[in-house]
Image: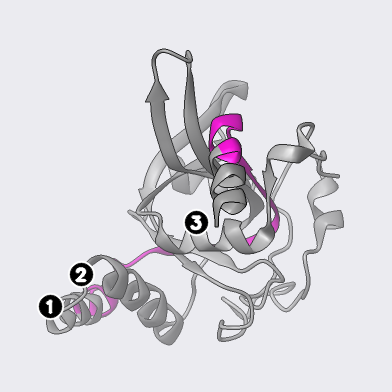
Amino acid sequence: MFREMRRKAQQISTEECMEILLNAKTGILGLHGEDGYPYTVPVNFVYTPPGTGNGPVSDSDGSADKGNGSESGEKKNGPAPAGDRNSLLGTIGFHCAKTGHKIDAIRADNRVSFTVIDRDEVMPKERTTKYRSVIAFGRAEFVEGDENLRRAANALGAKYSSGYEDLYMAETEDTIRRKTLCCVEITIDHMTGKIGKELMLERKNKHEND
């Protein structure tokens, strides 16, 4: 289903991809937009590595479909069944408004991509860049239930508002009480990472000199 990377020598390990997702501050969410146009939007997010989740995001039918479930993505239109937080590659979570372009796109087709550019250093003389990036593909699902919403929102708070637990936890409780909190989690089915040739050469030289 997913294409293999053409430049194999520049492909980074799954472990390095996970490290990038853990430390990155912003990612680009890619969705099937309206009228055949792709729709991409930057979002703050939190990555949860495999084996550290807390079970299904919701209790709806299909939510306990474990593993990558890539065969479910072969449908041309409409949402693919969701997995659970114990994906072999982990999950990506973010929060958003309850209405809008993102919400409509996810409801129409929950197959998404997610891109992070971890490093992008311009090298004018060489006419290139030193870059490191990750792209993930998966299925997005709305988080359901107060406890799951609390977990998802507080995970974001812990990442972006460390040291201000009282503030973000209070905000979480307030939005849950007012029924205004909307969180989305992406179960990752496939991901690859890539580094530029210059960064690859830099690593090789460092390894040889160590």
> Which three-letter amino acid code belongs to the residue tagged 1?
Leu
Which residue is painted at 81% across and 43% down in the image? Answer: 2
**Which marked residue is nearer to the observer: mark 3 or mark 1?**
3
Specify the segment rendered in magenta.
174-201
Question: Considering only vertical position in the picture, is 29 above or below 189?
Answer: above
Q: CA distance from mark 3 to mark 1?
A: 27 Å
Q: What residue is disc 1 on?
A: 167
Q: Earlier in the sequence, mark 2 or mark 1?
A: 2
Question: Considering only vertical position in the picture, is 142 above or below 44?
Answer: below
Q: CA distance from mark 3 to mark 2?
A: 19 Å
**Which marked residue is nearer to the observer: mark 2 or mark 1?**
2
- Within-10-Å neighbours for mark 2: few <14, some 14–19, many 20+: some
Q: Position of residue 128 (x, y in %)?
A: 49, 19
Question: Considering only vertical position in the picture, is 202 above or below 110?
Answer: above
Question: Considering only vertical position in the picture, is 143 above or below 121?
Answer: below
> Which three-letter amino acid code belongs to the residue tagged 2?
Ser
